[in-house]
Amino acid sequence: MPKQNRIDLGSIRAARARIADAVRDTPMTRSMPLTELVGTTVYLKHEHRQTTGSFKLRGATNAVRTLSDAQRMRGVVAASTGNHGRALSQAAKSAGVQATICMSRLVPDNKVSEIRSLGGEIRIVGKSQDDAQEEVERLVLERGLTMVHPFDDISVIEGQATLGLDICAGLSEPITVLVPLSGGGLAAGVASAVKNLDPRSKVIGITMENGAAMHASLAAGRPVQVEEVPSLADSLGGGIGLDNRWTFEICRDLLDDVILLSEDDILAGIRHAFVVESEIVEGAAAVGIAALLAGRVTTHLPIVSILTGANIDRDVHRRLVAPATSQG
Ligand SMILES: *Cc1c(COP(=O)(O)O)cnc(C)c1O
């Protein structure tokens, strides 16, 4: 099959209108230091300032707002304690839909209370993420709740695609977009939008070298599992699903490259964001900057690096950005 863009602009524009009152169009600024370093204009898209602290609100809101009336009545469910769980809780609340977030007993209290304060109903079960996911499946079967997947769902991908639309709205030339890559919902959506608007534009996925499930899957030609390793970019962990329906093929067809970074690279990205750009971002959000600092991006086009999230523990962040002499 020829390379093709499966998600058309019409459905992305419809998603943009559907989520408009719930989602901010976050600022995009030019970074002078990175522009000087790289030699082509570098913009930072400040999506870490999105409500709930990440872009995931776009996809979750679009998913909740495309439910049927019967589905809305019964509610939605997910097992994520991270950015997707926060986003889904907020998206459901703003649509008057009940969200249930399943998590294990090992999830720290502060994460539990954050999600509760965003309106999610918490169900604490078992001792692992797998136990929580089993509970999700039970609630889908027994109570008819709708599971909202963090990335492999067409309405979630179309919601994330609205970020590509917003980026291009401020620019009139082809661009190279640097997209943090995990399950690929963001990369699939942004690439669909950006390449529909200008096929000369490039989209590069960026992730950590340890546990990069999408990269390994693209190399193998099919979804594969990789061993999970702790990373500073914790929001990029997890697999793409052996039964992946959407993001594997869209990323295969639309991404121009995938760049893998070391933990030291990612740390340098977090530090640059804070010290030079005055932005507090989580590891996953710093990978675009990190790739530029490491000299890994070659393009003559203007670059847009998406800062995807701000949800990093403040004490951890303080330690990471502290000068080497005062560390420990
Ligand atoms: C989820 C997430 C990503 C990766 O998005 P995918 O759609 O899973 O590829 C990147 N950055 C942050 C902050 C996230 O929460």
Image (cartoon, rainbow, N blue to C red):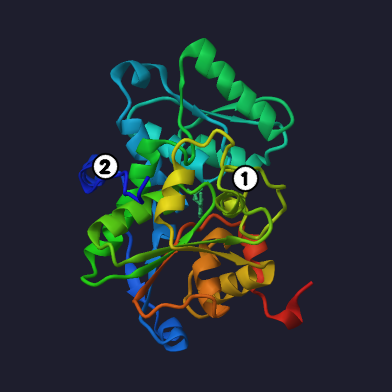
* The C terminus lies in quadrant: bottom right
Q: Quadrant of residue 267?
A: bottom right
The amino acid at mark 1 is Gly
Q: Residue furthest front?
A: 1
Kindly tell me whether mark 1's CB lies below 8 Å from ligand 1. yes
Residue 280 visible in the shown view: no
Residue at mark 2: C-beta within 8 A of ligand 1: no
Kind of residue at badge 2: Ala
The residue that disc 2 covers is 15
The quadrant of the rendering that contains the N terminus is top left
Q: Residue at x 37, y 37 (%)?
A: 154
Of the two numbered discs 1 and 2 on the same chain, state the one appearing first in sequence.
2
> In the depicted view, which residue is nearer to us: 68 or 120?
68
Residue placed most toward the observer, 261 or 283: 261
Q: Secondary structure at mark 2?
A: helix
Badge 2 crowding class, 10 Å Cα cut-off, few under 14, some 14 to 19, many 20 or more, is: many
Residue 277 relative to residue 163: left or right:
right
**184 shown above or below 85:** below
The image quadrant that residue 305 belongs to is bottom left
Q: Residue at x 75, y 75 (%)?
A: 327
Q: Secondary structure at mark 1?
A: loop
Could one spot residue 4 in this view of the protein? yes
Q: Nearer the viewer, residue 220 or 264?
A: 220
* Disc 1: which residue: 238
> Alpha-carbon neighbours of circle 1 within 10 Å: few (<14), some, or many (≥20)?
some
Give the residue drawn at x 58%, y 17%: 138
Report x, y in % for residue 297. Answer: 49, 75
> Left of 80 or right of it: where is 320?
right
- Residue 211 is situated, as x and y percent measured from the top left of the image, at 67, 53
Tag on residue 169?
A: none
